[in-house]
Amino acid sequence: MTQPTVAPSPASAAIGGLPELTVRGIVLGGVITLLFTAANAYLGLKVGLTFATSIPAAVISMAVLRFLPGSNMLENNIVQTIASAAGTLAAIVFVLPGLVMIGWWSGFPFWTTSAITATGGILGVMFSVPLRRALVVGDDLPYPEGRAAAEVLQAGSNTQTGAKESEAGLRVLVRGSIVSALFAILTQMKLAAAEAATWFRVGSGATGIAGGLSFALFGVGHLVGLSVGLAQLAGLITGWFILLPFLTAQHPLSVGVEEWAGTIFRDDVRFFGAGVIGVAAIWTLLKIAGPVVGGIRSALAASAARAGGETLALEERDLPIGIVAGGAVAILVPIAWLLWSVLAGGPLAGSALLLIAGALVFVVVVGLMIAAVTGYMAGLIGASNSPVSGIGILAVLAASLLLVGLVGRGGAPEQTQALVAYALIVTGIVFGIATIANDNLQDLKTGQLVGATPWKQQVALVIGVIFGSIVIAPVLDLLQTAFGFAGAPGAGPNALAAPQAGLISALAQGVLGGNLNWSMLGWGAVAGVIFIALDGLLGRAGRLRLPPLAVGIGIYLPMAVILPVTIGAVVGHLYDRWADRTRDAEFARRLGVLVATGMIVGESLWQVVFAGIVAATGSDAPLAVVGPAFTHIALVGGTILFLTLVWWLYRGTRREAA
């Protein structure tokens, strides 16, 4: 079976020959990478979520490059491709902090951290190249974020209207960033409360209520949307008002209510949520198995047609399959060296060859499957909503079980620790494949819609991976030095929750140490089946759906994180309903996305700066100007100020949209 010659699209016919992969575009993409990678790293460690960076990167690129001669839409597309790849790669914070939590690392060694991130990311690019024709060109998947980014680029392409729209978008983005950063500064001065919680008895059990004043979390809610936000609320209700009172009642009070309920939440409720997430991820894989297999067959047929001499239009030219295959094989060499450096001289050195061979096979086989699955899911529901964290959970379980099969479990504590560390490093490489494949096809869809050359975008993706890999290690080191991670040795009172890394490392320790909380995982799996059935019933009834993965995340994460996300989702939905009634609904919706992104970027970047201040001063509260006596005023006054600023930001955004 061969595919017909692809005729040039109108976009490529109109703009063919324009410069795409330019030095200034690469430099600008690198600068944006620094900002968004740092912001995403902080957000991932705080809340266990990251945000898509394509649209804000495109807006910034257009606003900057339009002052330079010869700038064009394809050059802007390369900038957002580089920045989005690097920003997406920051999701490696879902895995690597686990190495600090188990005591294997005391910090983040630059070369090792960069190597894990870069090798996985480049493999993600290579593995997803053959899927482009099948999942981007030959399928009608919506690719919501890829289409939105293309609309932004097309709207801002060398027209007066486009220039005005890009200026408006940049104003909204910057305004949201400044407000969120200033409010975060107020919380660190203790003039506004960052978070408040109260714990109480419920019958013979206990639970609590907690909330946070965080523009970053509020912005995340706007971006994930009403369906995901309400699903997380359903998870919150399940975890805090059903499971926690019931489970605490089964364990008599022996400490204070806060410590009592908090311990049960960490040890039992979170694993229940992990069971829901795992089953929901497996269900997602099963649903898309058929389309993924068909897509791979189509991609292979397209490659054969090209090898047979068919001429492809400029916007259909991928990296040659020989370079893709050779590059993938070549990357396995530094991976093998990296794994050897982990094992050499340690308690697993005697099994090094077996463990390295098993890991390489695992990376290739599981990596190919994950690239197909995450690429398809990104096309179906968008990169931000794609359940990559669920894929990470399945990957660490599979990697841990592989090691049990190769060398068994048990033995001395140092051997178990080494096995857990090895499982996390292998999972980190596979997770890099997952995150980049999740982003890659979204960017290539944008490129297809604007008439870009695929192989140039694929090169840009590799460049973005390298940029991100260089940035992530020092950012993680800074955050670990300043705050630490919950559950890690020496973590301070302001330790970042790092929820995904905590769960993934706990799963590896449980499987390899033989003490995994299988009971709660099993009950969570049963609940996951129920949530899947409920979501299906709602879909057939034409009602708002509750994605089971989002429900699982709502159970797993603390209430102080989920509640502001849910409120942000409701406010974002109300804004979108207003936007749909405007003359240019798509533009108004994009401005909403940009103000929410600004909320995330401003607070997150300031928190990275604040981490540097903490590290330099050695104080947990170096900016505090008031003491505990101001707490009540900070809570009431901070809440009023927060709500007022939210109203002001959305009011300004509506004015820009109108």
Image: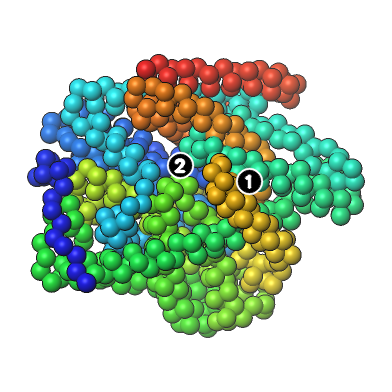
Task: Residue 87 in the image: state x and y as whole percent.
Answer: 40, 45
Q: Residue at x 27, y 28 (%)?
A: 63
Q: Amino acid at mark 2?
A: Phe
Q: Residue at x 54, y 63 (%)?
A: 282
Which residue corresponds to mark 2? 51
Answer with the quarter of the image where residue 561 lies: top right
User: 365 left or right of 564?
Assistant: left
Q: Residue at x 59, y 31 (%)?
A: 567
- On-image quarter of the N terminus: bottom left
Which residue corresponds to mark 1? 554
Mark whose residue sits in front, 1 or 2? 1
Q: Amino acid at mark 1?
A: Gly
Q: Is residue 367 visible?
A: no
Q: Residue at x 37, y 17 (%)?
A: 658
Task: Residue 52 in the image: state x and y as whole percent.
Answer: 41, 42
Q: Specify the farthest residue to the front.
A: 541
Q: Earlier in the sequence, mark 1 or mark 2?
A: 2
Task: Residue 551 in the image: state x and y as whole percent.
Answer: 62, 48
Q: Tell me, yes or no, whether the two marked residues, 1 and 2, touch with CB atoms within 8 Å.
A: no
Task: Residue 455 in the image: state x and y as whole percent.
Answer: 21, 56
| Tag 1 secondary structure | helix
| Tag 2 secondary structure | loop
Answer with the quarter of the image where residue 187 lies: top right
**Label 1 – label 2 distance at C-alpha:** 17 Å
Between 29 and 606, which is closer to the camera in this rendering?
29
